[in-house]
Image (cartoon, rainbow, N blue to C red):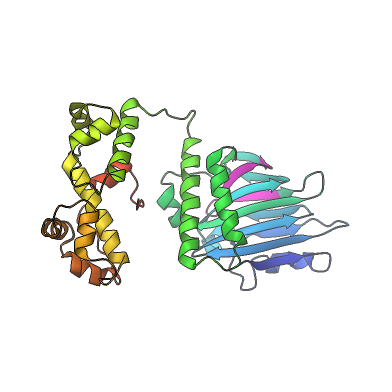
């Protein structure tokens, strides 16, 4: 659930520097924070924490100023990435590479390990509002490996930004119905969607998928849908995707993945997830084997032990404590490029 991070008005706005980081002085990071004096001063920030991340909605009827210098960085060395959705007004960012102005509807990024200053400017109705997400840098790097500079800004138009923002708002506005692990999954999904949006806009133009890439995605989708069919073969997949078996073999060969390896890796991964999430009284090992496309439990057990170094029953017993992983990265993961995917 959300909590109030701070509220400033004419009575206490001059004390903002001492209390903008919250009750325990742990939110955000060190910097010089100030509020412009005026006839109306109304600044409010609400916070929703999700694991190591925080979603903060900041609303103000006053101009706000924040500066983080090298001395602040040396003092606290807090390494976080902040993802900004500007809802109303403007966010003006001065940084080492220049000056960035994010208007209502724009998305921007700041990073705590580089000096910068921010000015929050209200709109013509004297309202400024931003939704921003504070993400530890090491967490953000899991999703975006390349270095994104402070001051990165793009118009938050398009389906990807809308989906990510909707997920973040749903998490923020939750009244306690979401379990912690569900909120974390939604947070990871939002950051993952944003990472793709950032990567797409970090180049001059979107890269069109080649015909072979599209064919590969069609093949992977067909295999997923028909994974439980023990008669799944190159011939059936090729026919279902409207291509020849020879072309399908060549397509997979170009990606260094034989058809049988691709299918068995996927089946074993799904089986492992099923085993770790169920109890022996709910679904038997034999039933799982058949439902992921193995012709016999014995064959399933042999292949599972070869991949996981333990039998399916041992895996189920150990999975609740330490979820085992295959000894090598699966061909399916290598093809999809998504080590987080569970499908």
> Is 104 a magenta residue?
yes
> Is 87 a magenta residue?
no
Give the image quarter of residue 57: bottom right
Residue 70 in view, yes or no: no
- Measuring 21% from the left and 45% from the top, which residue is drawn there? 263
- Measuring 22% from the left and 31% from the top, which residue is drawn there? 248
Q: Main secondary structure of the magenta part?
A: strand
Q: Nearer the viewer, residue 109 or 318?
A: 318
Q: Position of residue 37 (x, y in %)?
A: 83, 57
- Measuring 52% from the left and 44% from the top, which residue is drawn there? 149
- Give above or below for 266 relative to 308: above
Q: Position of residue 21 (x, y in %)?
A: 64, 66
Give the image quarter of residue 64: bottom right
Locate residue 341 relative to residue 304 in the image: left or right: right
Locate residue 121 relative to residue 196 in the image: left or right: right
Locate residue 285 relative to residue 171 in the image: left or right: left
Q: Position of residue 322 (x, y in %)?
A: 28, 69
Q: Which residues are magenta?
A: 102-119
Q: Nearer the viewer, residue 273 or 239?
A: 239
| Position of the N terminus by quadrant | bottom right
Which residue is most to the right?
39
- Measuring 65% from the left and 54% from the top, which residue is drawn there? 67
Q: Nearer the viewer, residue 9 or 209?
A: 209
């Amino acid at each position: 659930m959300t909590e109030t991070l701070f509220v400033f008005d004419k009575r206490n706005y001059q004390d903002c520097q001492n209390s903008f980081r919250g009750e325990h002085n742990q939110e955000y990071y060190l910097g010089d924070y100030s509020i412009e004096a005026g006839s109306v001063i109304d600044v409010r920030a609400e916070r929703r924490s999700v694991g190591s991340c925080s979603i903060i909605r900041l609303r103000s009827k006053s101009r706000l100023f924040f500066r983080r210098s090298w001395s602040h960085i040396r003092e606290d060395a807090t390494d976080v990435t902040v993802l900004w959705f500007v809802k109303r007004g403007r966010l003006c960012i001065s940084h080492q590479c220049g000056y960035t102005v994010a208007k209502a509807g724009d998305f921007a990024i700041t990073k705590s390990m580089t000096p910068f200053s921010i000015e929050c400017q209200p709109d013509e109705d004297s309202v400024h509002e931003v939704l921003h997400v504070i993400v530890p840098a090491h967490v953000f790097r899991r999703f975006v490996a390349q270095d994104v500079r402070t001051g990165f800004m793009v118009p938050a138009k398009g389906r990807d930004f809308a989906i990510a923002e909707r997920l973040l708002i749903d998490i923020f506005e939750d009244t306690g119905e979401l379990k912690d692990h569900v909120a974390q999954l939604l947070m990871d999904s939002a950051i993952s969607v944003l990472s793709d949006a950032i990567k797409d806009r970090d180049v001059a133009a979107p890269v069109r998928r080649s015909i072979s890439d599209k064919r590969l995605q069609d093949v992977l989708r067909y295999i997923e849908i028909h994974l439980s069919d023990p008669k799944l073969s190159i011939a059936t997949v090729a026919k279902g995707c409207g291509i020849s078996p020879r072309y399908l073999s060549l397509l997979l060969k170009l990606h260094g993945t034989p058809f049988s390896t691709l299918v068995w890796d996927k089946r074993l991964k799904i089986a492992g997830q099923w085993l770790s999430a169920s109890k022996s009284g709910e679904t038997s090992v034999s039933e799982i084997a058949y439902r992921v496309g193995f012709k016999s439990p014995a064959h399933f057990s042999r292949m599972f032990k070869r991949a996981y170094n333990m039998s399916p029953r041992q895996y189920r017993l150990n999975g609740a404590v330490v979820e085992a992983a295959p000894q090598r990265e699966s061909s399916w993961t290598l093809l999809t490029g998504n080590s987080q995917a569970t499908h």
